[in-house]
Amino acid sequence: MKKFTSSINPETLGLFYGFLGVLGFSLTLPATRVAVTDLNPVVVGLGRAVVASVPALLTLWLTRQPLPPRKLWGNIFVVAIGVIIGFPLLSALAMQQLPAAHGAIITGLVPLATAIVATVRVGERPSLKFWIASITGSATIILFVLISSGGNIQSAHVLLLGASFTAAIGYAEGGRLASILGGWQVICWALVFMAPVLIVPVALTIFQHGLSASPIAWLCFGYVSIISQFVAFFAWYHGMRVAGVARVSQIQLLQPFLTILFSAWGLREQVTSLMLLATCIVIACVIFGKQALIVRRHIGE
């Protein structure tokens, strides 16, 4: 397997790992929507990280990973605020009000936001062709939201926009740290660092609202805890480490399409022609953007 992967172009390999991460993330909104029908969104949004911190701690312990240098702790907390607190909590609150398929289109803004953060924070320099593809895809998403909502922006839309922005920060910072610590180590340390902080609000919420839920709700909570919050990040951050943050982030433009399919199949949500049209445009932008040049600055330069 190692010999096979070594013969593949690093960029292609990075995009492959990125796609595996996106595949894992694609069920996040549908699973979250099912989970919050019975469980409090704070339990779903923050409790998933508490659960994921257990295998994260075991993985770090079994592989005898040294504690990250103190100078990187602040960066790890930035990752945690983005992908462990911001996106999970805000998306869980939004899924109480919006269909998962609708929400998936809005979170399609994450790739553009990640590319912008990567330019500022990581020092990557995408070409004009890349920006044209990213902006076109993102503009398609915004237009879809305006048309499908009749021009009325709901609070759930704002929550998802906030979720997308925080996720972008966590992705870009995590992709940067992956070049130093390793892809899977980033998410593991972020989970372990934040678990003691998150236990408090999760415990208080459980005390107030209880934990009564259907088996399917628990199954979906288990998915977002183990796959969305833990396993998928192994591939995601490794892909960013290999092919670059901005490049791999564009693969996430495919996530709305995958989420719509999962929502239609599992939740019986309606898939409109407008959704399909928007998704097709976004996929075309991914293909166009993949061919664009991105200049990467290596850590330490």
Image: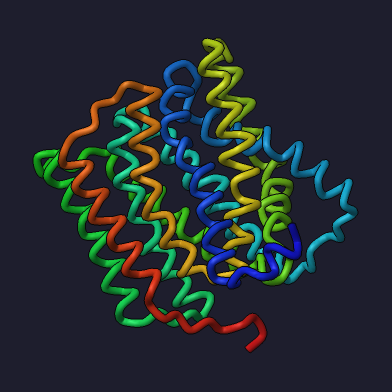
What residue is rendered at 53% in x and 12% in y? 213
118 and 267: which is toward the camera: 267
203 and 37: which is toward the camera: 37
**Where, by quadrant of the figure, is residue 179 drawn?**
bottom right
Quadrant in the picture for the N terminus: bottom right
Above or below — where is 300 with respect to 233?
below
Above or below — where is 79 with respect to 244?
above
Q: Residue furthest bottom?
A: 301
164 and 247: which is toward the camera: 247
Q: How many marks?
A: 0
246 and 285: which is toward the camera: 285
Residue 116 location (% of width, % of height): 40, 71
What residue is rendered at 60% in x and 38% in y? 227
Q: Is residue 37 left or right of residue 220?
A: left
What residue is rendered at 57% in x and 21% in y? 219
Is residue 62 among what the camera can see? Answer: yes
Residue 224 location (% of width, % of height): 55, 34
